[in-house]
Amino acid sequence: MKILVANPRGFCAGVNMAIECLDEAIRMFGSNIYVYHEIVHNKYVVERFTQKGVTFVNAISEVPEQSILLYSAHGVSPEIREQSRARKLQTIDATCPLVTKVHLEAVKYAREGYHIVLIGHEGHDEVIGTMGEAPASITLVEDPEDVAKLSFPLDAKVAYLTQTTLSVEEAGRVIASLKSRFPKIESPPKEDICYATTNRQDAVKQLAKNSDVVIVLGSQNSSNSRRLQEIGASFEKRSFLVDGAEELQREWFSDADTVLITAGASAPEVVVQDCIAWLSREFGATIEEVTTREEHVAFPLPRELRVLQSARN
Ligand code: 0K2
Ligand code: SF4
């Protein structure tokens, strides 16, 4: 068996920043820290922080007054920020800057009187946060069927935005139907699906065709990880999304000559290496890392954390 290990895979700049942010907050304040939603959508990462004593909450009312609260990488709505202020929480914002970019676009288009069509998945943390920036001006669509149901007047000013972690191809189909219904529809100069999402998908598209099985490391609630598994399946390969090596099953690999391994943007490298070790042990596999794109993106820690850091030094 040959294992192709996709590069880029795993942690993106936003996830690196969010995790470093929480680690640094623990160093500074101890582990009596709250995080609104999972810091990133990964079981392994969330368990690691839970074991350190961090508490993940789904409502601000669960956080005791004056506590320290981090916002996850997926961003939050202004209403959540207001609830935190009312509870006198000390907040640290670990939202990825590329998610914040979409929030700012929503605010700008809404101020200019546009109807905004947000392409995304209903109920996803990022979508809830973005929609909260201008709830009266944003309509969510998931697919071309939803676009057909839109009923804006023909002369309406319309703009579209997207969730950052969509399938590039699926989003492209929704955008094409939007453009055909609203030929003058506006969009930001740089698209919202982020570099990390795009690069991880491109790597699978390039490498899946030469593989028999595709293994994606990531959690089931991770949008970008699910998209990678779907792309593997779209090449008619056996394609699996797993949290770790303990979920791998021997029969998935029967007759497999080549296995592609990749990881979603929230999956740590340790789970990738565990899978490689398991396959090597079970099937005597050889390993080839294939780089389809170099990435050199890094984000600074949020300003409020840096201010607190320098106040302590
Ligand atoms: O892919 P998702 O948006 O579900 O999020 P994660 O799995 O946590 O990956 C990191 C991306 C966070 C923000 O875009
Ligand atoms: Fe930011 Fe993209 Fe990573 Fe999401 S997947 S945290 S938008 S870099």
Image (cartoon, rainbow, N blue to C red):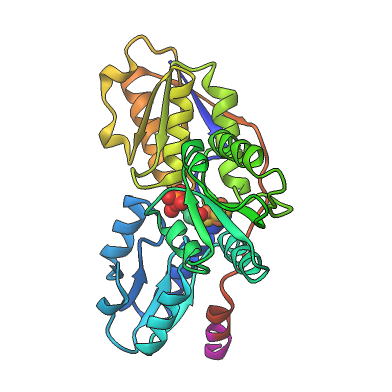
Percent across and percent down for residue 216 are 42, 34
Q: Residue 117: x, y in percent?
A: 56, 53
Q: Quadrant of residue 289?
A: top right
Q: Is residue 120 above or below residue 227?
A: below
For the N terminus, the image quarter is: top left
Image-based side of 33 in relation to 300, left or right: left
**Residue stretch in magenta:** 308-313
Q: Residue at x 53, y 40 (%)?
A: 9
Q: Residue 133 versus residue 232: which sits nearer the camera?
A: 133
Q: Is residue 106 above or below residue 146?
A: below
Residue 265 drawn in magenta: no
Where does residue 14 sit, x and y in percent of width and height? Answer: 55, 58
The residue positioned 32% from the left and 39% from the top of the image is 244
Q: Is residue 175 visible?
A: yes
On whether residue 312 falls in the magenta region, the answer is: yes
Q: Does residue 2 lie above or below 156 as drawn?
A: above
Query: 240 or 16, which lies in front?
Result: 240
> What residue do we see at 63% from left, 36% from top?
176
Quarter containing the C terminus: bottom right
65 with respect to 299 (left or right):
left
